[in-house]
Image (cartoon, rainbow, N blue to C red):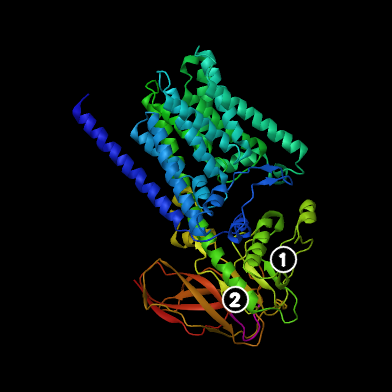
Amino acid sequence: MNKCLITSSTRYDKLLVAFCTAVITSLAFWIASINGLGAIDDHQFISTLFQGKTLKAYYSTEIGRFFPLTAQEYNLATFLFFPSPRLFFAINALKVVLLGALLFRCLILTTASNPSIALLWCVTLLSIGFANSAGRLHVGEFNILLCTLFFIWSALSCDLTSKKCSIFEHIAAIAGVTALVTAFFYKELVFVFAVAFSSAELLRHYRNNLGLSTKRLWSVFIVGILYIMGYALWRLLYSKGSYASEHAISSLDTLWLFSQSDPFIIFVVAPCTILRIVLITRYSIRHTVYDSFLIAASAYALSYVEVGLYNTYYLLPAYGFAVCGLAGLLAQTSVKRSVRILVLSVAGICCANTLPVAVSDMQSLQLVANNHYRFIKELSEWIWKNPMKNGSPRNLVLVGVNPEKEMEIVISLKTFLVSLGIPDSYFRVITAELIDNNVMNNVSPVGNETRYTPEVDDLLIFNPYQSALTLPPLLSPSYHEVLRSESEWAIPRWSGRDWIINSMQSACTFSALWSVSRHYNGYAALLLTRLKTNGTVTPLRSPLFALGPLDFPVRMRSGIIRQYNVLIKNTGTELWPSNGTLSSGMFVNISYRWFNERNQLILEGNRVPIPESMLPQDEAKVTLFLVTPPKAGKYKLLITPVQEGVQWFPAVNGKIIEIY
């Protein structure tokens, strides 16, 4: 072989290793930086490991769930170290490094080209499912992927040699089967991998006269069948309910959702699997172990579509089989270069399209965990220092939360507070939304047959898990702010396509889209000090107002958007009607206008609702997105309330700003 080609290939291999190392290191550091526990699932750690107890295996006869190995690695770690969020996410970071290295090794064994390896490796490590698994605890899919990758490495190590298996390969085969069987106990449907892959491989051996004496394949097939039979028997004899019956949606809806979060599986792997099945049905000699990998991945995805269960990380375990199968097939000399380019291009587009969503999810998960952990600690201190005067429990009202969908949020809040020493008698958790499911109404301890109306001295809790999103006001007359997270927002959960489309909009439109699309990841507690005023909505006669200090520069660039928090006070004698939304009617909103030197209106801004109706001397604070005029010149800026369909309030003091 040409020496120059060898040198070039070696140099490119080093670049590939350096690239993958940089990506995996960045992911590991991000995960290790999380120092908090979220409301979802993590309350189980608070009630067990943080109390010096053992985390029990997960058996739920009420909903028919059986995966006893979930989160047991954290249980083991606490025998050596004191439990902490930092410890648990350090374990997740270690998993990421192992996953990245093992996947890289499996892809190398397929003899795929370096560009194929780099792209398919990124498809997995930068997927939405990977981000959501890495940033959360209690997600078994992370461990399933690790186990299945070990099995794939074992299968490739054994199947790619024509020699008699060595002792090492025998050990690798046993370890691979053990790893796959272990994965059964992290999620019920993992048996699909075993049955689908072993069936396809046994068929390949039979059709190509390779014999059916492969103990490894038969053991995988038999164990998979025995597991599903045992699980079915357990469901029949002991299960009292069904998780799927309570959470399942239609298969078409499930397929649509997976196409948004896992387009690589739906639009690349599934079509390739179908084409390969058609091909190997006609030509058995073309059937390879890589086809069996694709069949296993597609069967796993199809099983979730069939039962109608969706989550962003449910298909993550399928990526190991999918990318290794695809890499091996593309490495074959019989595959045309144009086909190889087409498949990799579509895979690259899928990865690029979902990458911004994965980044947004990573930021959200970090903010939620850190914000929640700090918020709960501060909330417990406030409740302890501020008991109700009459000795009754204080109502903690979860705003926008429906216990039919967010029951775990209710359980979590109570569990965390009790673990920090707050007696049950000090508080009562109430949800603001009603339950319209009779089954949930019977089992929910906080089921509301009618929508709960907060009362004076209730503490309203705003959190990221809301069915009806309601944001905590910056300042509102009826509320006294008790606690609020410092970092409340994550970037919009836009796909790559969304970013391209939205970036082509005007600056004002883009700002509006950005504002409404950001994810609220903060926590806030506001004490209700008075009932909201619901006055008659009539035209105001002589409204007066005052603005708080505004930090406006004397010069601003044209066509930009600035965010300002505006403090406003009702200095008149009339009530300002508002319902906190931009609904139609004679409600009072806040806006702004730009006038040129001839006092001509140049630009009128978007409306911002005030949080509630304001009595005389009431104060409120709102967030205003200020758009500057498109042309240079001197302009007067007026920020004033406006009663829709009636009048702008008389301007107080405008500010002259030079636009350049």
Residue kind at label 2, given as amino acid type = Val
Q: Position of residue 649 (x, y in %)?
A: 57, 81
Q: How many labels does the image show?
A: 2
Q: Which mark is residue 347?
A: none
Q: In which quarter of the image is residue 422?
A: bottom right
Which range is magenta?
613-619
In terms of depth relative to the viewer, which is nearer, 132 or 90?
90
In terms of depth relative to the viewer, which is nearer, 626 or 266?
266
Q: Is residue 83 left or right of residue 503?
A: right
Q: Where is residue 553 in the image (x, y as percent from the top left)?
A: 38, 77
Quadrant of the rendering where the N terminus is positioned: top left
Residue 509 appears in the figure: yes
Residue kind at label 1, given as amino acid type = Ile
Q: Where is residue 144 in the image (x, y as percent from the top left)?
A: 54, 40
Q: Residue 482 carries which label?
A: 2
Residue 540 highlighted magenta (yes or no): no
Q: Which residue is drawn at 55% across and 81% down?
A: 568
Residue position for label 1: 430
How far apart are the alpha carbons under marks 2 and 1? 18 Å
Residue 263 appears in the figure: no
